[in-house]
């Protein structure tokens, strides 16, 4: 058996060609806590500004801590009566419901999303997520690390 055979991929030595930047990267583990929170992950504003969204919080799990991943994993939670902005952009993303339920608008389609329902949002598709229900609507959102800024569409555009 090789010396590193039992080690996790996180414990394997970096190749000699790795840059100094990559040598500083370490695996990270964020322990899930009560209330869909993770130790070491802070609440962030959904967006910096805007009035087309309400009652939504973002928690960046992967992509805000110096990782070199080509994707980001974020947890969003929309409180009762809240919604994301209605927008479109060139980048794609995946949404996986892990708490409660919500309404997802993609193009002209309206769907109810529930636990472990998964949605792929194609580039340039108008979309919005809403929570008309009593319980919080929580979902993982996986996006490209490099992405364009959304174009806000407002209501009915």
Image (tube, rainbow, N blue to C red):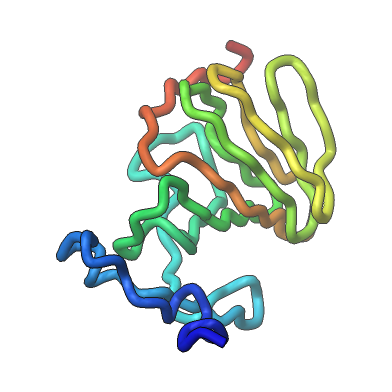
Quarter of the figure with the N terminus: bottom right
Residue at the image point whose x is 75% and y is 60% from the top: 99
Q: Position of residue 59 (x, y in %)?
A: 49, 61
Which corner quadrant of the image does residue 149 belong to?
top left
Quarter of the figure with the C terminus: top right
Q: Where is residue 142 in the image (x, y as percent from the top left)?
A: 56, 46
Give above or below for 12 relative to 83.
below
Give above or below for 119 relative to 115.
above
Q: How many labels does the image show?
A: 0
Give above or below for 90 relative to 56.
above
Q: Which of 120 and 150 is in front in this view?
A: 120
Q: Where is residue 62 in the image (x, y as percent from the top left)?
A: 45, 60
Residue 83 placement, left or right of 90:
right
Residue 19 placement, left or right of 12:
left
Give above or below for 93 relative to 78.
above
Residue at the image point whose x is 23% and y is 72% from the top: 24
């Amino acid at each position: 058996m090789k010396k590193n055979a039992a080690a996790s991929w996180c414990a394997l030595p970096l190749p000699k060609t790795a840059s100094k930047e990559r040598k500083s990267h370490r695996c990270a583990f964020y322990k899930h806590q009560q209330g869909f929170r993770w130790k070491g992950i802070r609440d962030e504003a959904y967006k910096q500004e805007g009035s087309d969204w309400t009652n939504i919080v973002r928690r960046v799990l992967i992509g805000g801590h110096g990782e070199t991943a080509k994707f980001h994993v974020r947890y969003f939670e929309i409180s009762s009566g809240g919604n994301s902005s209605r927008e479109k952009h060139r980048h794609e993303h995946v949404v996986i419901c892990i708490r409660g339920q919500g309404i997802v608008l993609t193009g002209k389609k309206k769907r109810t999303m529930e636990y472990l329902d998964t949605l792929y949002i194609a580039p340039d598709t108008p979309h919005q997520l809403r929570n008309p229900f009593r319980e919080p609507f929580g979902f993982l959102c996986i996006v490209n690390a490099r992405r364009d800024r959304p174009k806000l569409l407002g209501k009915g555009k």
